[in-house]
Amino acid sequence: MTAVNTARPIRSGPEKRPRNRDWLHGLLMSAPAVAGLVAFVGIPFGYAVVLSFYNVRLGSPLAPSFFGVEQYRRLFTDPDLSGPFLRALLNNLTFAVVVVPLQTGLALALAILLNRKLKAIGFFRSLFFMPVVFPMTLVAVIWRLILARSDQGLLNSALHAVSFGNWGAFDWLGDSATAMASVIVLSVWQGVGFQMVILLAGLQQIPGELYEAADLDRATPWQQFRHVTLPGIRGTLVFVAMLTSVLSFRVFDQVYVLIHGGGLDEDATRTVMYQAVSTAFDQNNIGQASAITVVFFLIVVALTLIQRRVVRPDNED
Amino acid sequence: MSSTSRRYRRTACTSLALVLPLVALAACGGGSGGTSADAGSGTGTISVWAHQGQKSEDTALQNAVKSFNSSQSKIKVELKLIPGNDYTKTITATDASQLPDVMEFDGPTMANFVYNKKLAAIDSYVSAKTLGNATDASKAQGEIDGKHYGLGMYDSGLGVYGNKKLLDAAGVKYPTGLSDDWTAAQFTAALKALKAKDSDGKVVDLQENNGLATEWGTYGFSPIVWSAGGSLLKDGKAEGALDTPAVVSAMKTFQSWKASTDPNTDGNAFAKGRVALSWVGHWMYPAYSKALGSDLVVLPLPDFGNGPKAGQGSWAWGIGANTQNAKAAGAFLDYLMNDTNVTAMTTANGAPPATKTALAASTLYKKGGPLQLFADQLAKPCGDSAITTSCVAVTRPVTAGYPTVTAKFSDALNSIYGGADPKSALAKAARAIDQDFSDNAGYKIP
C-alpha cells in the first residue's frame, strides 16, 4: 500500500520501471491464490451457470436438454418450489443475522475473560477452544442427545431436575419455534472458540502501557474497555465479524445430520446449501441444484459487498 | 482488427472452457448403447462394493469373502464397505466405468441403475441353479423386461414388534396373525390404553432416530398409503394416487401418533422396555429377541381399510455394466447365494432368506417359527402395481424415477409428522413427482 502511494507522484520516465515491477510482484504473489480461486470457485461457478440453463440429471441416459430460464422460473414462481427455496433463504438470513453479533460478542467476552495472567490459563483456553477441534457432524450427533424431545433428552431432564419436576418433555428440534434456535446455539457453541482465539491474539497486541496510563488516569474498567480495548482491536473485530458472516452462510452439516436422524423441523431449518445438496444428490436434479447455488452465490456476494461498504476497517492510523 | 480478433478468440476460449464439461457430460450421458460387460477369463481379481450395515452383517459378508478367496485360487475378491447412509449416493455419483465388478444395491434403486447403464443383466453369468433357487419375490424384485439385474441374499419383513408383558399389563388385545389384524382405530386405541400405564406417555417407537425424510420413511410408512387404498405411483403418475382423501385421512391418523412416540434417540427404546411397540423391520429381530426373549411378539402393521400391507424388497447383488470379468463376478454371486452364506447372513440380520433352500431350512421363518408372520406376508406379494385387498407385501415402485418418488414422499411424511397439513403436503409431493416424471419423459428404460 505505502509503496504504491510513494511511487505515485513520481512521473519521470526512468522511474517507471519499479512501479512495473511492483505490479509484477503483486501478480506473482497473488498467483497461487488466484489460481486456486479460478480452479475451485471460478470454473465450477461458470459450470454451474451453464448447467442451470439445462435439464441435467445425474447419470441419466437422456442427453441434457436446454431448458432456458425454466429452472429459475420454477425457483421463483412455482409455489411448490419457490416456497421452500425462499424459506431456505430466509432461514439462512435469520441464521446469519443472529449468529454474527451473537458469536462475535460471545467470542469477545470469552477472549477478555481468558486474557489474564492466571495459573493454568492455557488449560482454560484450550477448554474453550476444544469444540472447534471436533467436526461439526460429531458435535451435531452429540447435541441430538442433548436436545432429544423425550424426557430422556439431556436438556429436558436437566430442566426437569432444576424445576423440581415441573418441566415436561419439550420437542426442541421438532418445534418450529425452537428448531432454528437449537441449530444456532449448537453452531455458536461449536464455532465460538475459533473467533475467540483470533480476538485473543488481537487483545495481546494492545500495549500494556496503555492500561497503565489509563489506571493512572483512574479510568474505570468499563472506560478502559471502551477507550483502550475496543479501539485496540477494532480491525480484528471487523475481520472476525466478516469471517463469521461468510461462514454462517455455509451452514449445512448440522442441519443435514439433525434432519437425518433427529426429527428436526425441516421447514424451519432448511438452508439453501441443504436444499442444493439434497436436490442434486437425493433427487439427481443437477440443473435445479445449479440454479439454486447460482442464485445463492449472487446473493452472498451482494451481501458481502454491502457489508464491506458498511463496516470498512479504518486502517488509516 | 487485431484487437477485435484477440477479443473474439478470448471469448471463444472462455465459452469453450465453460461448455466443454457439458459436452463431456452429454457424451457420457448419451451412452454408447448397450452394456459393455465382458465375460472375461473367469480368473483374476474382482472388486466388490457393499453397504456397511449392522456389524453382524458386515462380519457375515467379510467371512463369505474370506472363505471364497481361500476356497479356490483362480479368483480373488476385494471387498469395499461403504457406509450405508451414503451408499446409494456413492453409486449414483460414480461414473459407470469406475464402478466395481460386483455391487450391492438397495432394491428400489435398481431400476435407476439399469436406466443409467450401471448394471448388467446377470442371467448369462450366474448359474441356472442359483437363479432357480431364488424365491419368486426376490426374482420379481430384480426383474425388468424379463431380464434379471439383481438377486438378494435376503428379502425384508416389516411389522410391529410388541412387548407381551407391557401389552398384557395394559390390557391390550393384540392380533395373532394377518387375519385378525387391528384396524388403525384399534391401533390408536391400543396406544391410548398403553399410555395410561406409562410414566412418560411414550409407548411406541417409529424408529424416529433413523429420520423420516429418508428411505426408512418411505419403506416404513408407505404401507399406510397402500393400506388406505392409495399408491405412491399409479401408471407413472402420483397425482390422484398419493393424495386421495383416504390417504390424507390415514396420514392424519399417523400424525396423531407423534404424541405417543418415543424419539428413540439412543436406539434402545424398545429393547430397554421404555415402549411396548416398535414399528420396524426384520433387522431388529436379533437385538429384540435377545433383549426380550419370550416376551417378544411380532404383529402386522395396522389396517387402514384396504387390508394390512407391508414393505418388501431389500439389498440385492448385481454385476457392474462395465465389468471386464463378468464370469468371475457370476462365480462369486453363485458362491454368495449358497445355503451356507445365505444362512449366515440371515442369521446375522434376522432377514427372511431369499433362496428357496435356505428359506425352507430357516428356523425363524418356517411354520410356527417366531417370524412366520413375515414369511406369510411375503407369500402374498402384490408386486408394485397390482395392490388388492388380499395381497400384503408391496414392492416399492420399480422405476428409474424412484429417487424422486422417495425423496418427495419422505419429505412430505416428515413434514406431516412435524405437524404440516397432510392434504397439502401430499398434493405438493404428488405435483413434484409428476413434474419430475414429465421432465424426464416418464423415465422410460431405453
Image (spheres, helix red, strand yellow):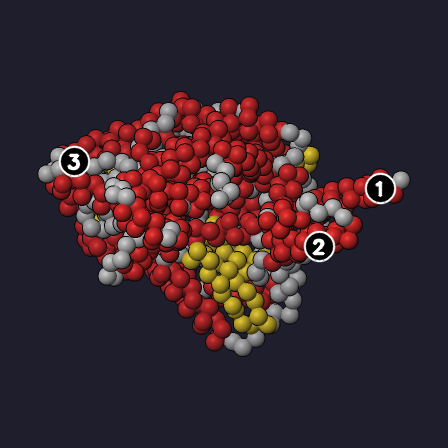
Which residue corresponds to mark 3? A167
Q: Position of residue B324 (x, y in %)?
A: 64, 64
- Which residue corresponds to mark 1? B3
Q: Nearer the viewer, mark 2 or mark 3?
A: 2
Is residue A283 visible to us here? no
Marks 2/1: CA–CA distance = 28 Å
Residue A166 image position (x, y, % from top left):
13, 34
- Where residue A116 appears, as percent x and y from the top left, is 28, 54
| Disc 2 secondary structure class | helix
Element class at badge 3 = loop
Few, some or many residues within 10 Å of mark 3 (<14, 14–19, 20+):
some
Quadrant in which the N terminus of chain B appears: top right
Please state which of the two labelled residues, at mark 2 or mark 1, is closer to the viewer.
2
Exactly how many numbered labels are in the figure?
3
Label at residue A18: 2
Q: Is residue B187 left or right of residue B330?
A: left
Label 1 crowding class (10 Å Cα cut-off): few <14, some 14-19, many 20+?
Answer: few
Q: Nearer the viewer, residue B98 or B132?
A: B98
Task: Report crowding for label 2: few under 14, some 14 to 19, many 20 or more residues within 10 A (C-alpha).
Answer: few
* Residue A292 picture quarter: top right
* Amino acid residing under circle 2: Pro
Mark yes or no: residue A166 visible. Answer: yes
